[in-house]
Image (cartoon, rainbow, N blue to C red):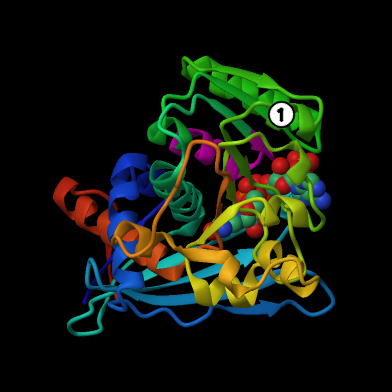
Amino acid sequence: MKLLFLNRQEVRELLPMRACMDVLADAFRAYSNGESVQPLRTMMKVPATEEILASMPGYDGASQSLAVKLITVFHNAAEAGFDSHQGLVALFSAEHGNPLAIMDAIEITAIRTAAASGVATEALANKDATTLAILGAGVQARSHFHAMTEARDIKSVRIWNRSRDRAEALTEELSAKNSADVTVADTAEAAVSGADLICTVTAASEPILKGAWLQPGVHLNAVGSSTPSKRELDTDAVVRSRLFVDSRESAMNEAGDFLIPKSEGAVGDDHIVGEIGEFLSGKVRGRQNRDEITLFKSLGMAVEDVAAAHLIYERAKAEDRGVWTEM
Ligand code: NDP
């Protein structure tokens, strides 16, 4: 039995942002229509640390494919030169169960997470959004820049980060390769002031974004927090927003951005308007007027990894990429 091995560079080249957004839109629809299977992820804490090993199995009904992502989240990894999120995706045949491929998960996670925000932005943001604020300057900040420029005609970008030097390095990198005007903001408030789109992509535990700073009509992608006790948005930001999620089940179990305001009694479960897949299937209304503030709370779904892995595998075979090994 032959298995295809695909490294990080190959995954990056085989998963262009637009193609990933297209398969994710299909995966979101299939998930919300009950055609997919995705148990809540298992997150295991490594003893005596805050570091995590997570397992994310799923079946994507749109591509009829089966995979599991195994990923570590080690926020101390940067000191040793590693990414904070590392792992692999194993793709299986949904027909016979045999393993088909093993591929790098750093790049899949970077691209598919931003692509999910890209799909939500195309669905919910005002069409003429041109100004983007990014809070954070890590892996997701970079990939979200690419997804946002795919979703809208972005002319100006302000990046704020806890460590200014990292924001400066990312600004320089993005400015060199893109036409948008990219600058560093001194504060998170300055970054989001007047922004049409905001992406929060930090590992913060406490709010870095306040509702009081939001202008009417802005669309927010809140990506960084994925546990009940951590959040990037304050309660006011959530209360003021029309809230969409990737998965209701995940939001009810994992989204500190929603669960903390809920525990304070500021919002109820009915504050979640719907899943992006429900919007894409025409089951719920999206933006209702220009001034509404829309919020996409992203937790990250296994079916996103499955759909992306399936696309990568098909393209790798067509383009004769990767290394085949005997099991
Ligand atoms: P990186 O490690 O590459 O970057 C982390 C970023 O968070 C840096 O900008 C860092 O700033 C900032 N940060 C860390 N701690 C704090 C803090 N206490 N306050 C403010 N900023 C902070 O991570 P990624 O870009 O890969 O991931 C970003 C976040 O997105 C993580 O929380 C991750 O778990 C989450 N994520 C969500 C996914 C989803 O599907 N929703 C998928 C993948 C990741 P500095 O440079 O100063 O250290």
Q: Residues within 10 Å of mark 1 (few under 14, many from 20)?
A: many
Question: In the displayed image of the protein, which residue is found farthest to the left?
Answer: 318
| Residue at image location 37% in from the left, 49% down from the top | 11
Residue in front for this viewpoint, 162 or 169: 162
Residue depicted at 68% across the width and 25% down the height: 169
Q: Residue at x 28, y 45 (%)?
A: 19
Does mark 1's beta carbon lie closer than 8 Å to ligand 1?
A: no
Nearer to me, 190 or 146 = 190
Quadrant (top left, top right, bottom left, bottom right) of the C terminus: bottom left
Q: Which picture quadrant has residue 108? A: bottom left
Instruction: State the image coordinates of residue 43 (x, y, percent, origin top left).
Output: 63, 77
Residue stretch in magenta: 134-147
Residue 92 spot, x, y in % from top left: 29, 75
Magenta stretch holds residue 165:
no
Horizontal side, residue 174 vs residue 318: left or right: right
Residue drawn at 35 percent across, 66 percent down: 306
Q: Look at the numbered disc 1 and give the secondary structure of its residue.
A: helix
Q: Position of residue 235 (x, y in %)?
A: 76, 57
Q: Nearer the viewer, residue 307 or 231?
A: 231
Amino acid type assigned to the residue bearing label 1 in the image: Ala
Classify the position of the N terminus by image quarter: bottom left
Q: Which residue is mark 1?
A: 191
Whether residue 209 is visible to the viewer of this picture, yes or no, is no
Q: Is residue 287 above or below residue 277?
A: above
- The percent coordinates of residue 32 (x first, y second) are 35, 71
Magenta residues, dominant SS class? helix
Q: Is residue 112 left or right of residue 253?
A: left
Q: Is residue 262 visible?
A: yes
